[in-house]
Image (cartoon, rainbow, N blue to C red):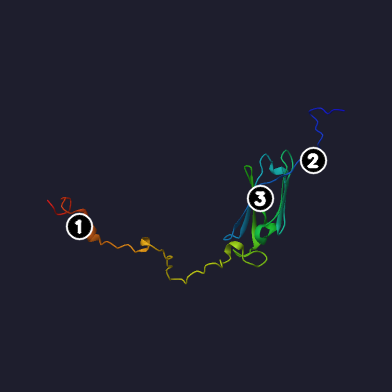
Amino acid sequence: TTTSPKMSAASPADEAVMVAPATFRCNRKRMVLMIRVALHHVHPNQISLRTTRTGIDLQTGGRRRYRLCREYPRGIECDDSRTTAAMNGSMLVIEMPILKLTPIGNTPDGGLSAALRPAAATPMPPVGTKRKAPAVDGPAAAPKKKVAKKALAATTTSGEGGGPGEG
């Protein structure tokens, strides 16, 4: 048996579901979590959005099938009853008020993140003290002499008649 070009062997349920590209932004001043999801060629009626206190589940139907199922970053907890969502062009913008927010630099398990841990190799000098440059051997290590501004001006204007007050 053969299939016609119009009919495919795969059913619509077997189509690949794409992961929707999304960005999570946390506005700590307004205490709002903003999620932007790019949904190209998707009508707002085809979007199924479900938010919980700790995560988001978004699915689309129709021509393009997307799915986004993620927890909020860094253990953030949001008030899912006050979620607002608006479609701006092909971008779905979701805003949620934050209930629980971990401090910057702390991970949800209570420790400091790797980027903010102090380096153990070189201790920092006390505040208000200058750091000394490492010692260098040879003639390059000799300090340069400072030239006074008056001496520098006398060498550049000597005898050529370009100085002030000469007539």
Q: Amino acid at mark 2?
A: Asp
Contact, mark 1 vs mark 3 (Cβ under 8 Å): no
Q: Residue 100 at what x, y percent from top left? A: 65, 64
Q: Earlier in the sequence, mark 2 or mark 1?
A: 2
Contact, mark 2 vs mark 1 (Cβ under 8 Å): no
Mark 2 highlights which residue?
14
Q: Amino acid at mark 3?
A: Ala
Mark 1 highlights which residue?
154
Q: Residue 110 at what x, y percent from top left? A: 65, 67
| Tag 1 secondary structure | helix
Q: Give the class, few, some or many, for how many residues have Cα within 10 Å of label 1's Cα (few <14, many ≥20).
A: few
Query: At x 66% / y 41%, what residue is drawn?
Result: 40
- Dividing the picture into quadrants, the one containing residue 113 is bottom right
**95 to the left or right of 62:** left
Q: Residue 72 at what x, y percent from top left? A: 67, 57
Q: CA distance from mark 2 to mark 1?
A: 88 Å
Q: Is residue 85 above or below residue 116?
A: above
